[in-house]
Amino acid sequence: MPAEIELFSLLVPGLLPILVGCVAVFVVVDLLLARVGVYRYAWHPGLFRVALFAAMFSGASLLLLRP
């Protein structure tokens, strides 16, 4: 994947599509986990959400950007 992508004649970082996709998937996963009640068992729900998003974004970035 290139370092920069041209989008409507603007150069945006190559990680932007991955970030947008991860945000969309994270919103769905977050709603599902909240309905099931997983956050009741987390020590700090906000920290758990940030860690979950960081793991999703880094995993997707590493999988899609490897040479």
Image: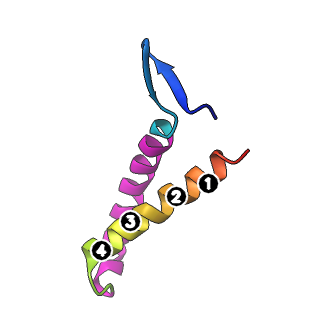
Q: Earlier in the sequence, mark 4 or mark 2?
A: 4
Q: Which residues are magenta?
A: 18-41
Per the image, label 2 sits on a secondary structure element best described as: helix
Q: Which mark is residue 58?
A: 2
Mark in the foreground, 3 or 4: 4
Provide the residue designation for mark 1.
Answer: 62
Alpha carbon separation for disc pair 3 and 2: 21 Å
Q: Amino acid at mark 2?
A: Ser
Q: Say whether marks 1 and 2 touch (CB < 8 Å).
A: yes
Alpha carbon separation for disc pair 1 and 3: 25 Å
The location of residue 16, given as percent across then percent down, is 45, 37
Vertical arrangement, residue 37 with respect to residue 21, above or below: below
Provide the residue designation for mark 4.
Answer: 47
Vertical arrangement, residue 38 with respect to residue 34, above or below: below
Alpha carbon separation for disc pair 4 and 2: 16 Å
The location of residue 7, given as percent across then percent down, is 45, 19
Taking the magenta stretch, the answer to whether it contains residue 19 is yes
Q: Specify the principal SS of the magenta part.
A: helix
The location of residue 28, given as percent across then percent down, is 39, 55
Mark 1 surroundings within 10 Å by alpha-carbon count, few (fewer than 14), some (14 through 19), many (20 or more) = few
Alpha carbon separation for disc pair 1 and 2: 6 Å
Q: Which mark is residue 32?
A: 3
The location of residue 37, given as percent across then percent down, is 32, 79
